[in-house]
Image (spheres, rainbow, N blue to C red):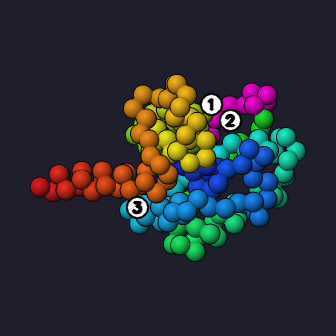
Amino acid sequence: MKLIILDRDGVINFDSDSFIKSADEWRPIPGSLEAIARLNQAGYRVVVCTNQSGIARGLFNMNALNAIHQKMHLAAQEVGAEIDAIFFCPHAASDNCDCRKPKAGMLLEIARRYDISLKGVPNVGDSLRDLQAGFICGCIPHLVLTGKGSKTQADDGLPPDTLIYPDLAAAVDALLDAADARAAAVSA
């Protein structure tokens, strides 16, 4: 099975320093949903893995989060994309849970749910904690410069061999081009 793990805010949709608190505030980054559709067409299962501490902070509740995710699913389906699952951490950093990125709890749950190793699985994020959580599990880190990505790139400490792209669409293009090149080399 081909799997890819995407962060949500700043990767799929525009981010906000004051959090995405309602479905009305959720807006896709141009090209991101179409990139997910291309991944689906190439046989990838797309999983979203996202910290949502706004719940613990009382900024929004589970009904609002469900409405946001429903809007994301519907918008994806409108362009032929399918998001297989969404894993989220509702905790604040002070809760010291195992699921909040940069800890690997959510990613380990993804591995358990799909009964696979995450070694070599692409993990796309815009923040260092996204990449760190994936790197711990053996994922290949892909930084996008949307959302907090430009600031993340400027800071030191990216995991080794982090691949950097302007946005999700460019990351998907590169990922699929590399897969096509490998397939061509095998058949030659």
Mark 2–mark 1 contact, CB under 8 Å? yes
For the point 75% across and 31% down, the residue is 93
Please state, as top left, top right, bottom left or bottom right, where the C terminus lies in the image: bottom left
For the point 40% across and 61% down, the residue is 43
Q: Could you tell me residue 182's position as x and y percent?
A: 24, 50
Separation (CA) of disc 2 from disc 3: 28 Å
Residue 72 against residue 133 in the figure, above or below: below
- The three-letter amino acid code for the residue at tag 2 is Arg
Earlier in the chain: of badge 2 and badge 3, it is 3
Q: Give the SS element for disc 2.
A: loop
Q: Could you tell me residue 66's position as x and y percent?
A: 75, 59
Q: Residue furthest right?
A: 58
Q: Does residue 130 appear anywhere in the picture?
A: no
Label 3: how many Cα within 10 Å (few below 14, some 14–19, many 20+): few
Q: Nearer the viewer, residue 65 or 12?
A: 12
Circle 3 residue? 43
Residue 39 against residue 49 in the figure, above or below: below
Q: Does residue 38 appear anywhere in the picture?
A: yes
Please state if 43 lies on the left or on the right of 19 as rendered. left
Label 1: how many Cα within 10 Å (few below 14, some 14–19, many 20+): some
Circle 2 residue? 100
Q: Could you tell me residue 49's position as x and y percent?
A: 61, 46
Mark 3–mark 1 contact, CB under 8 Å? no
Range shown magenta? 93-110
- The three-letter amino acid code for the residue at tag 3 is Gly
Q: Nearer the viewer, residue 67 or 177?
A: 177
Separation (CA) of disc 3 from disc 1: 28 Å
